[in-house]
Image: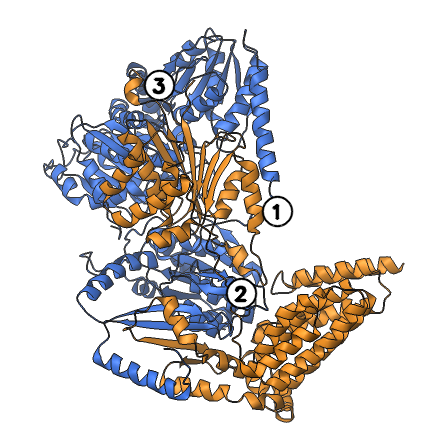
Chain colours: A orange, B blue
Amino acid sequence: MTKPISIVIAAMGGEGGGVLTDWLVQAANAEGLAVQSTSVPGVAQRTGATTYYVEIYPVPLAQLGGARPILALAPSVGDVDLVVATELMEAARTVSRGYASAGQTRLIASTHRVYAVAEKSAMGDGRADSEQLLRVIEAGTRTRLLFDMEQAAKAAGCVVNSVLLGAIAGSGVLPIAPETFEAGIRAAGKAVDSNLRGFQTGLRAARGEVPAPVQPDHKRPQPETSPALALVARAHAELPPPARESAAEGVKRLTRYQDARYATLYLERLAPIASAERDAGGDGSLTRVVARHLAVRMSFEDVIRVAQLKTDPGRFARIRAEIGAAPDQPVVVKDFLKPGIDEICSILPSLLARPILALARRRGWIHTAYLGREVTSNGIGGFTSLWLMARLQPWRRFSHRFHEEQSGIELWLARVAKALAISPSLGLEVAECARLIKGYGETWRRGEANFRSIDRALITPALTGDWPVAFALDAIASARIAALADPEGDRLDRTLAAIDEGALRLAG
Amino acid sequence: MAERSYKHEVDLLRLGEGQTFRGEGILAVTKALLQSGVSYVGGYQGAPVSHLMDVLVDAEDLLDELGIHIEACTNEAAAAAMLGASIAYPIRGAVTWKSVVGTNVASDALSNLTSPGVMGGAMIIIGEDYGDGASVIQERSHAFAMKSSIWLLDPRPHLPSIVRMVEKGFELSEASHSPVMLDLRIKACHVTGEFEAHDNRKAAISRHTPMGSPATFDYAKLSHPPSTFAHEIAKVEERMPAARRFIREHQLNERFDGDIAEIGIVVQGGLYNSLLRAMARLGLADALGNTRIPIFCLNVTYPLVPEELSAFCAAKRAVLMVEEGTPDYIEQALGQILRRADLQTGLYGKGCLPEAGEYTSDVLVEGLAAFLEQAKPTGLDPAPARRLADSIKRQRLDAAALLDAELPGRQPGFCTGCPERPVFTALKLAQQDVGTTHISADIGCHSFGTLPPFNMGNSILGFGMSLASAAAVGPNLGKRPISIMGDGGFWHNGSITGVASTMFNRGDGVLVILQNGYTSATGQQFMPSSTAEGRRAETPFSIEATLKVMGVKWLKTVRSYSVGTMKDVLKEAMTSAEKGLKVIIADGECQLARQRRVKSEDAARLKAGERVVRVRYGVDDEVCSGDHSCIRLSGCPSLTIKPNPDPLRDDPVAAVQQSCVGCGLCGEVAHAAVLCPSFWRAEIIQNPNRFDRWLDGWRRRAIGWLQPETAS
């Protein structure tokens, strides 16, 4: 018995899923096949998941003797011939809903990611694991064509839907010649050339010429500078192999952030950790983690650092490239700076900063008093003031913030060293807690407070050695995750309370 | 009406005798109306029927040729009341809305329409927003049809069937003097297909050929006692029998015979395709509609024709009633028909099939397996059906088990540059300062404020009802509630049910009206306060002036993108000692509509060599620390994340995509929320003038002097 061919298209609002569906319908019509499509586009808004469903009856209408196939308006579980998805997670979602089957379904999807709100808004890294998404797709379908179609579409100057159409045309699932689809694109008369280019890319991919994945190296290491060279060599000589790359990066970063003396301090701080780890039989992975976090902590973000970054020699060129400005088009860049009492005090000496901060905290000004400024940073006045601010770099050593940060760093390093003496894995957990301290203003205050509560409630008791190591590891790791779960700190409070109970049971 | 153009669709409406129409279900209905000789059309937009009105409003010339009067009504009650023209005059008319919500709003007019009955054919096209993808409460319109004696057409989701039911529906309405409802489910509105078109028909009476004199006074046409008592009798003694006669004579319902004649299936027309697919999977039908089990397809689900159903059931041991949703009105009626006809046919329905939710082919496979197991037809082993039903269940579970954790949802949200998003940002920040309060949400794009990252709203009571639904909250909460309402909701009924009622009762509360100039969620249709610069002849109504006339004293209009100002005004409204309604109008044009216009205007200006400034926002990825507070306060689709370029850090950093329209929220948020200094704003000056070049030259030189290594 002949069955209709069933196609599910998973897209997001505004991605051209509707146009793709229309192309399929028109091509089937052109071939004299019965076809039906439906969709649940919901409201007119963007970003929501949108599903289109198409059925094509493979026997031409002319051969049916006046009969008309009854086509369904929705996919059936385990009975879909072709799943098409404009993005990786939507592909995996369609598979996980059971429409695809490992015995029947061909899947065509782009491997790029468009992040969902929950992934974007996480305080740390909330991205779904692409490897897992691929495993789901692999396990739930019969054959697959997966590549970065967004990249391919960009290269062709079109939207992802024409690449998908080409891939569908070349998949052999539909009894429709590729030329029919091309004729449809021409007949529609919109962006014909770029759509045809995209279509060809998809078609070639389906026939085996899958575009090689472009894996742009997104990491941007610090440039080599002569003052840092000797220290980089020293890092290589003193530290275990796993830590060397991070430490070299740290040295370059801190030389630029402050000076060679400060970078030397960095290496001096790392050395005892490295030797303690060696003595404990570690492979250097703890030293690597400390090297990373220590460099980030030592290059804390104060107004001088922000001014340095905002006047970075490469910055305006980067911005021009990002926004696609032509060489003859002037670009005006504005920055949103809003230094508060905290930030201003951070560059004053402690003698002045302490009483001001104490007063501001008492009066509640810390949260309310700000100096909001919109600076034209490539304007003459704006650039000059940022440039002057960046020139305060040597002064930083005498600032209040510098002193506070150094004592925070020393405390953290002491904790790591002590934990390491108990067990390298405990050392690693304590070291990772540095991740919580980042950002500016409120974000920084929140992270710092979270670190302190974890230090007080977990790290301190763990370092007495009274807790079994496994319990301490689990407690610290779960508290760190909890601290990054919500900005209000509810989850951290609950987690700390639960661990407290567990510790009591342990003692009793 | 809207910013979008429907030229292609309008061309389809002009097709003549014998030409093939290819398009969507709802457009086929529109074409069928023109083929039926309607004199007037009205409606209120709402998915999935917005398209009908959008296309007709764009088809001004065609409607003019045919003499059809059209109204974009301010709500469904107004649309229903339009059908009053068919009570005393022999003219055909059709109105449309989304149901069940629209039918709720329209029900007063509907009751008073159906009581005297109609002379000219009156049709209500309802988009039955039920099942997968629905955006409203899950209730069926069937109850309205039954209680008001409106005949309910539920055609097979197949364009020729739909078109035939529109054409026959007008005849049925006239033959029985009752309005009819054409019930189209969401997917049926969007289903594509083809049918052979007929010529459009001009009505005998229309705005081109008006009657000239009014109907003679006839008290019997008024829904007023004692006429209403006579109407009640006429409904049961004349109209219902006439309707049943028409349905039978014109064979509006369809019977499909099969070889397993001792059982049968009765199905709502709209579910026919899903049923056939389920049967095909069980080997009980083929793809061309040949069935082994006889099927009675109800293209009219109210009223039922008892003779037809008893004839179908007479020689059968058992029938399965396939009726979506609860209560099971049709199944109950069928039971009564069988009882009265003294038939011993077993009746199956709910029990084999679930009481709630859409009947997909998967659900129906399970239901059919249960039916076959219980009815035990001779020579048909139910075991294969059970095996398929079980394998579907297993496949669903196995597929879900492929995931280690549930995938993050992808709900709809505010568009890039939406003027409503910043208002929720401000509301989030204001509540951080002065404490949380009850948020009364409403229907419209702004209901996305109830989704991440905002998660705000304690109730949604209906379109334009936010303020009214907070009336009893304030006094019992001891805090001023905040009601959110769109301008669409304000004109739909919020001005009366909300503002007038609150003023009249000296209520205390805060109302935030999101004035974006369109009913945006349904496709940016115009409404009374749409300005639409030069594309509407009328002077738009002013919400501000209306509120003043109603006596609102505390009234502030704030540009919606000004997050800091909005936050302060909200705080003031929440904490002010002054009692009474406080209204904040958040003013900002719908960005979807605006972009559609601005893009083409900018393109034209660029081409003409004029100076055009393009604005884009961005993030310095080295400055961003990867905390994503900005995203938690925005949720903009263009504000996303990317891998951290810092070799020493892993958390992804914020990034702005190409799709940014430069609305300014990012900068406002960075300022108002005192976030981080990573956002920048770039103005790209296209076709720069001499001053631009001169200034740019000096700026580059100055930076070059200070920092020779700067690449520019």
Q: Which mark is residue B226?
A: none
Q: Residue at x 84, y 62 (%)?
A: A467
- Near-viewer residue (A172 or A187): A172
- In the picture, measured across the screen, residue B28 lies left or right of residue A102, that is left
Q: Sequence order check: which comes first, mark 1 or mark 2?
A: 1
Mark 3 or 1, nearer chain start: 3
What crowding class fits label 2: few (fewer than 14 Cα within 10 Å), some (14-19), or many (20 or more)? many
* Residue A191, image x, y percentages: 26, 49
Q: Residues within 10 Å of mark 1 (few under 14, many from 20)?
A: few
In the rendered image of this protein, does residue B17 appear above or below residue A385? above
Q: Tell me the CA gap for discs 3 and 1.
A: 48 Å
Closest to the camera, between mark 3 and mark 1, is 1
Do marks 1 and 2 share a chain? yes
The N terminus of chain A is located in which quarter? top left
Residue for badge 1? B405
Badge 2 is on which residue? B644
Identified by mark 3, the residue type is: Asn
Can you see residue A391?
Answer: yes
Q: Tell me whether circle 3 and circle 2 mark residues in contact (CB < 8 Å).
A: no
The answer to whether marks 1 and 2 mark residues whose Cβ atoms lie closer than 8 Å is: no
Amino acid, disc 2: Asn
Q: Could you say where residue A242 lies in the image, as x and y percent from the top left?
A: 67, 65
> Marks 3 and 2, how far apart in space?
64 Å
* Residue B592 screen position, x and y as percent: 33, 56
Q: Secondary structure at mark 1?
A: loop
Dot 1 amino acid type: Ala
- Dot label at residue B253: 3
